[in-house]
Image (spheres, rainbow, N blue to C red):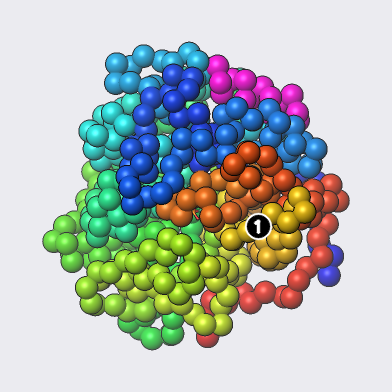
Amino acid sequence: MIRTFPKDFVFGAATSAFQVEGGAREGGRGACCWDGFLQRPDKGFDGEEASDFFHRYREDIERSREFNLQALTISIAWPRIFPAPDGRVNEAGLQYYSDLIDTCLKNGIEPYVVLYHFDTPLYLFQKGDWLAQETAEAFLQYARVCFERFGSRVRHWITLKDPFTLASGQYITGLFPPNEKFAVSKAVEMMHRMMLAHSRAVRLYKSMKLPGKIGIAHRLEAAYPIKWQPANTLAADLEDTLANEFLLDATLAGGYRPETLRKINRILRYEGRSFVPNEAEIEVLTEAAGLTDFLGVNYYSSHFIEYYDGENKVVHNAQGKKGTSTFAIRGIGRRIHKTEVPSTDWDWSIFPSGLYDMLLRIRDNYPAKPIFITENGIGIHEQLQDGSVQDDRRIDYIRQHLNAVLDAMDEGVEVKGYFIWSLMDALSWTNGYEKRYGLFYVDYETQQRYPKKSMYWYKDLAAKRIMLTVNAIQTKGVD
Ligand code: BG6
C-alpha cells in the first residue's frame, strides 16, 4: 500500500551538542559533567572531538539541505553560554549558536532548538545537579539569555530532552555521572525538579511574547507485561508509571494524578521514601501544562516486564553483544527479552507497535497537543564500503516506525513531524562511537562524512512524501 504524508509534515534529523560538537576546549566553553567522567580509564572514549560539528556545522547543514531535510534539532551547550559559576555570559558561545541558527535558516532548514540535553555545567553538577535548587535558578537565567538572543529567529524551542533517561542513568543504572545506583527516590525527585524548571521556562518564554512555540521532549518507551498475569501486569504498570506516566502527567495533566502518585509511592516504599509535591509546585506545573505548545516524543524501543522481587541488578551491554544486558529492580520489575520481538545488538527491542500504542495512549489520557517524534532511530555496528553504508536495517526500522506514526495519525493523533536520531554518527553516552545511528557515516579519523543508503532513501521520502508500507505491524504488545 502507498501511504502519503500531509504537506506540512516535517522531515528532519536530530543532534545534541555534547554528542556531536567536540571543540570541548574551544570558544570559551566551560567544563560539563561528562568531560572528566568519560576520561576515566575504564571508559575508552570521550566527547573532546565527537563528530566535530563545532567546526563542520556549515557543511553539515548545507548537506542536510542537499538531502532535502527540512529541520534539525540542535541543542545549545549550557557550558558554552555560562562557562563558570561567576554568572558571566560567554559572548563567543552565543555567537557560535547565533551563526549556527543563521546557517540553518539560510539553508532553509528550521532549527528546533533544545536548551538542555544532559550537559550540565560542571560547577552546577558538583553542587547537586538537578537535585539542587541552584541548578533550576541557573537554568532559568540561561533560558532567558537564549530566548533574548535567539528568540526572534527560533520558531520551536524544546526546554529539556529525556528527563527519565537522564534520571535513570544518573540514579538507577548508575551509567551516567554521578554513577549512583538504585536510588529511585532521587530519580523521582530529580524528574520533578526538571519538570518544574521546564514549567518555569515555559512561563518565562510566554511572558516574553516571542513568535515561536515551546515544548519538551520525553523518551517514552511502552512497558508490557511479558505474560498477562496480575503480578506481571502490575510490574509493567509500575515501570510505565515511573518512566512515562509521571512525566506525561507533569507535562500535560498539570500535576500528578492520584493514581500516579499512589504507584510512585508504592515503588518508593522499598527505599523507605515517599514523594509528596507541594501545592505551589503543582500550580507551576498546571500553569505550564496549559501554555506548552507541543510534546516531543523520543522513541526507540519498548520493554516486556516480569514481576521481580529479588536483588536489584543492572548489567549494561556496553559492547553491543546481544543478550548481555539485565535490568531488574526490586519493587518495579525485570525486563525480559521477548524472543519473537527482534532486537538490536545492544538488546533494544525493535517494536514499532510500542510507538503506536504510546501515541494513542497520550491521545486517550491527556489534553491534545501537537506531537513531534523528536527522536527515533537504530544503533548498528557499521562499516564503510565503497564510500557508503548499506544500512537496509535502518531503512526498515524507519519505515516501520513511520508506518506506526501514520497509523496513529489515521486514529486522530496530531503528529506534525519526525526527526531521525541522528543526522550523523555521534557519541553514544554509554556505548561510545561503535554504535552508529547516523544518516551520514562519520570516519572519526578524518571526520569525513558519507551519506548512507538510508540518507538517500530519506531524501526521496522527504521529496515525494509517499511511502510504501511494509507488512502490517502488530498493534498489540502482548499475547
Ligand atoms: C536518547 C537520547 O534518549 O537516546 C540521545 O536523547 C541518545 O542522546 C539516544 O543518543 C540513544 O541512546 P544511546 O545510548 O544508544 O546513544
Q: What element carries label 1?
A: loop
Q: In this view, does 316 lie above or below 204?
A: below
- Is 96 magenta? The answer is yes
Question: Mark 1 sits on what residue?
Answer: 383
Left or right, 468 with respect to 413, comes to: right
Give the percent coordinates (x, y) of residue 232: 36, 80
Q: Which residue lies furthest to the front in this view?
A: 445
Q: What residue type is labelled 1?
A: Gln
To which quarter of the image does residue 104 belong? Answer: top right
Q: Relative to residue 419, is residue 197 depicted above or below?
A: above
**Quarter of the image where one finds residue 357:** bottom right
Q: Is residue 346 left or right of residue 194?
A: right
Q: Is 467 placed above or below 64 here?
A: below
Crowdedness near tag 1: few (<14), some (14–19) or many (≥20) residues, C-alpha within 10 Å? some
On the rendered image, what quadrant is the N terminus found in?
bottom right
Q: Nearer the viewer, residue 215 or 35?
A: 35
Highlighted range, magenta: 95-108
- The prevailing secondary structure element of the residues shown in magenta is helix
Determine the residue positioned at 83% across, 57% down.
Answer: 466
Whether the magenta-drawn stretch holds residue 438 is answered as: no
Rendered location of residue 16, percent (x, y): 53, 39
* Residue 192 visible in the picture: no
- Along the viewing direction, whichever of 82 and 25 lies nearer the viewer: 25
In the figure, 13 relative to 225: above or below?
above
Judge left or right: residue 109 versus residue 426.
right
Name the spot of residue 27 as percent of width and height, x first. 49, 19
Q: Which residue is drawn at 16% across and 57% down?
A: 273
**Residue that appears at 25% across and 65% down:** 267
